Image: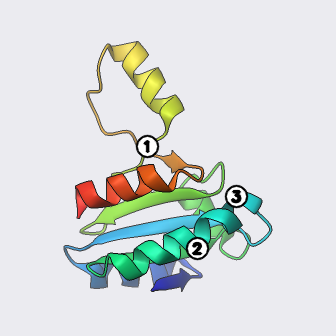
Amino acid sequence: MVQNIRDVDELKALLKSAENKLVVIEFSAKWCGPCKRIYPLFHEMSVQYRNVLFANVDVDNAQELAQIYHIKAIPTFQMFKQAQKVTLFSRIKRAICCFRSGSLSEPIFELCGTDAKKLEEKIRELM
């Protein structure tokens, strides 16, 4: 089941209640075409992975959260464990990081877009 998060307090409460469970948050908007396409897959994952908590933040209704979490594109997925971001990724940032350092030395912190396969792979990796 996907929980709708409307403000900072609700997000903090969700992260606290999750304890050691993985929390996957989708930042999206009702008018966003790609968000509409990925949402059924995201909901399906929430049913399949019962030991993971799934939440949605509508960036239009929760602008403060979108700003706090530096949301620049939607949909964006962020993952948390023990109330801390654990991993987010994007191909562009990965390429830039690899180009600069010659290898991946740190986690990449963003997944933007509708690649459900990549999202599911990362969920399985972090469960």
Lower position in the chain sequence, tag 2 or tag 1:
2
State the image coordinates of residue 72 (x, y, percent, origin top left): 65, 48
> Cβ–Cβ below 8 Å for labels 2 and 3?
no
Q: Which type of secondary structure does the marked residue at label 2 adopt?
A: helix
Mark 3 to mark 1 CA distance (whole Å): 18 Å
- Quadrant in which residue 39 is drawn: bottom right
Lower position in the chain sequence, tag 2 or tag 3:
3
Q: Which type of secondary structure does the marked residue at label 3 adopt?
A: helix
> Cβ–Cβ below 8 Å for labels 2 and 1?
no
Residue type marked 1: Phe
Q: Which type of secondary structure does the marked residue at label 1 adopt?
A: loop
Quadrant (top left/top right/bottom left/bottom right) for the N terminus: bottom left
Residue type marked 3: Pro
Up the image or down, 48 lies above or below 94; here it is below
- 33 and 105: which one is in front? 33
The residue at which mark 3 appears reads as: 34
> Cβ–Cβ below 8 Å for labels 3 and 1?
no
The residue at which mark 2 appears reads as: 40
Q: Residue at x 29, y 26 (%)?
A: 104
Mark 3 Cα-neighbour bin, 10 Å: few <14, some 14–19, many ≥20: some
Looking at the rendered structure, which numbered label has been put on residue 27?
Answer: none
Residue type marked 2: Pro
Mark nearest the camera among 3 and 1 is 3
The colour scheme used to paint the residues is: rainbow
Q: Residue at the far left: name it.
A: 20
